[in-house]
Image (cartoon, grey):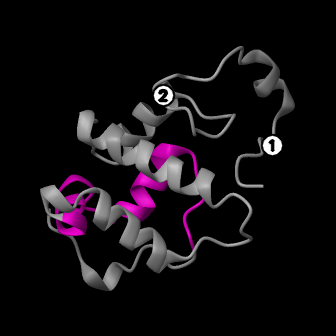
Amino acid sequence: MLHTATDINRLIQQSEIDPDFPDAPLDWSCDEAIEIARSQGIKPTQVHWEAVRALQRFYAQHADETTINLRELHDALDEHFHHQGGLKYLYTLFPGGPIAQICRMAGLKAPFIATDLSFGSVA
């Protein structure tokens, strides 16, 4: 459902899954993620990639659900990055909204109302 590619030709061209991103959507590539990050003013670091992997894993674990629960997603990311400061830390890495920006980098559709511009940013 969430990992379905819209272009079968891209799927055929890809010969294998990236071992660093085992839960990535089939039509996702690291190069495209880097371009997306740069277009949003983000220079990807290992922590950014860890966030991408965590989000891709969450989506893969919830692939059977029709919608992704934003609260569960927030809680999962907050728990995953708890030792670094949780979601507050992620806002320093993704000032445009961690869920929305990580989803773009990860090749995933962001949950409904994942970005609330009224909260501002930390940049």
Q: Is residue 84 visible?
A: yes
Q: Main secondary structure of the magenta part?
A: helix
How packed mark 2 is, by other alpha carbons closer than 10 Å (few <14, some 14-19, many 20 or more), is some
Q: Residue at label 2? A: 30
Q: Which mark is residue 6?
A: 1
Give the image location of residue 20, x and y in percent.
45, 26
Q: Residue at x 24, y 59 (%)?
A: 90
Give the image location of residue 83, x and y in percent.
15, 57
- Asked if residue 96 is among those painted magenta in the image, a careful observer would answer yes
Q: Residue at x 77, y 41 (%)?
A: 5
For label 2, the SS is helix
Would you say 107 lies left or right of 92 here? right
Q: Amino acid at mark 1?
A: Thr
The magenta segment: 86-111
How packed mark 1 is, by other alpha carbons closer than 10 Å (few <14, some 14-19, many 20 or more), is few
For label 1, the SS is loop
The answer to which quarter of the image holds residue 24 is: top right
Quarter that holds the N terminus: bottom right
Q: Residue at x 71, y 68 (%)?
A: 65
Q: Which mark is residue 26?
A: none
Give the image location of residue 67, x and y in percent.
67, 73
Would you say 95 lies left or right of 11 here? left
Which tag, 1 or 2, sits closer to the chain's start?
Answer: 1
Quarter that holds the C terminus: bottom left
Q: Residue at x 27, y 82 (%)?
A: 119
Q: Is residue 45 visible?
A: no
